[in-house]
Amino acid sequence: MALEIYAYRCKKCGQLHYPFRMVCKKCGKNEVFEFDTVPLPKNGKLLTFTTVHNLPPDFNVAKLGLGMVELENGLRITGQLKIPHPTFGMAVTGKVEIVREAEYSKNYGMVFYPG
Amino acid sequence: MREVYVVGAGITSFTRLEYPLSEIAAYPAMLALKDAGLSKVDHVYVANMGGTRLNHQSGLASAVVDTLSLTPVGAEVIENGPASGASAIKTGFLAVASGLHDVVLVTSAERLREVNNLEATDFVATLSHPLAEYIYGVTLPSLAAMFTRLYMQKYGVTERHLAMVAVKNHDNALLNFFAHLHEKITLEGILDSPEAMTNNPYVAEPLRFFDCCPVSDGGACVILASAEVAKKLKKPLVRLAGVGQATDSHCVHERAEPTDLLAVRGAAAQAFKMAGVAPGDVNVAELHDAFTILEIVQSEEVGFFKKGQGHLALEKGETRIGGKIPINTAGGLKARGHPTGATGVAQAHEIVLQLRGEAGKRQVKDARIGFTCNFGGFGNNVVCLVFKRED
């Protein structure tokens, strides 16, 4: 099964949210948990990016690419970048992979490659 | 609402402090009590962000109030990330303004250097969204870096502008005995010379080492009192005239315009409205320059300069001591240091000194209106304060 990251669509007004929130930010009428889950699209364009050289202890690497991506449906997401020379607005495509591993935990998240 | 005055102020050196968190909060409180000429207060608020996790100290306020032998007055900890300090002052303001208390002691402490640099970075990164930011390795420098890249592209800010903020704030800190970094830096040394990449490597591109605040320990305190009490004490009258607070989305990527800091704009507008002054009336300001870019952007968002023109004002020297609106006269977070929970109170401390005319070599001439902006998370919880000299 392909791994997905989900957006949350308000059952009342259709507004998409990522990440999860308990009340719809558009209509505000949504009671708790009245959201449909929708897989986030994988393709988008790079909004901004950085290479971090000073990482928390869980990361066993010297540097790490991070960026914000605007996905096809207009939602934005923060993710890791495996792109050697990122540029503004470049097309990127995402894959759900392990992004952070500690002794007792594994976290899955979106990793972007050149699109 | 009653009027609220600042009647006492105290601060520790911002550096690595080798004594317990409760004493870091109590020491500036002693200085502030002495400064005010008071020995009793009605309530104690302690601003702190990481004591529970970093220093194995929960219920810090109980420890502080007893260390000061002020029991049985009430005491509590105020935690609001890096905006804890100004939040505690705001809480103290409410207590005095409402008439519940006449004299409130607002102290603060942070001891980040009890853990190593990477653990401190990780601790501060827990401010970000746990599932949509933190797990990716997002740290506060990386959020600031992504923000800076957009700002550079949109408004023409360059690495030279960022370095100019660092140079200015290091110069100011040389005049502040309590600052963390007493180190003269030059544009040549951190940007132009062949050694610049060694002296000033990238932390999160395009932000370099000298664009980021140091990790500091420290504490600061102010004492708030009603007009009746303040007028009996023999100190210049400084009134806490305006208080404002606003929030923004937890995830930075959810903001409609990622280069806007709407919480700063909102909090500042509220504080100015309450004080009945305009941004142009401010004589001295403390902005939250945890990263050099933030001083430039906040100077625009609070209304000192038009959006996108903060770096031009910086070039002209308008934010230096002696300029049109001196910013971060004590060195800012960049060079005074950034003990997270204590920073908001330290900012207020500096403004109180400036308005009283007690700031020594860094005194802004005839300062009568002061402003502070204390920035929590990456702009998701911001508290602004306006102070006025009266008499």
Image: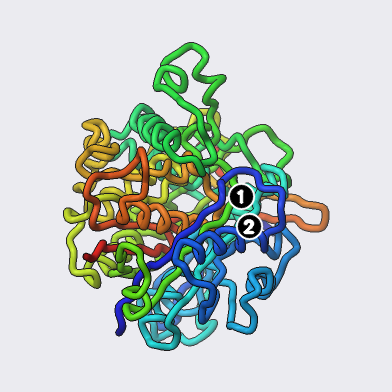
Residue B374, how many percent across, how many down?
Answer: 42, 58
Tell me residue B299's x, y (percent). Answer: 29, 48
Q: Is residue B110 above or below residue B239?
A: above
Amino acid type, label 2: Ile
- Give the residue at x 41% y 17%: B188
Residue A75 appearing in the image:
no
Seen at 32% across and 78% down, the residue is B227
Which residue, as the protein is rendered here, is positioned at the far top? B194
The residue indicated by pointer 1 is B217
Query: B167 left or right of B20?
Result: left
- Residue type at tag 1: Asp
| Mark 2 and mark 1: Cα distance apart in space | 8 Å
Mark 1 neighbour density, 10 Å: few (under 14) some (14–19) many (20 or more): many
Write the residue at 72% across / 66% down. B57
Quarter of the figure with the C terminus of chain B: bottom left
Q: Chain of mark 2?
A: B
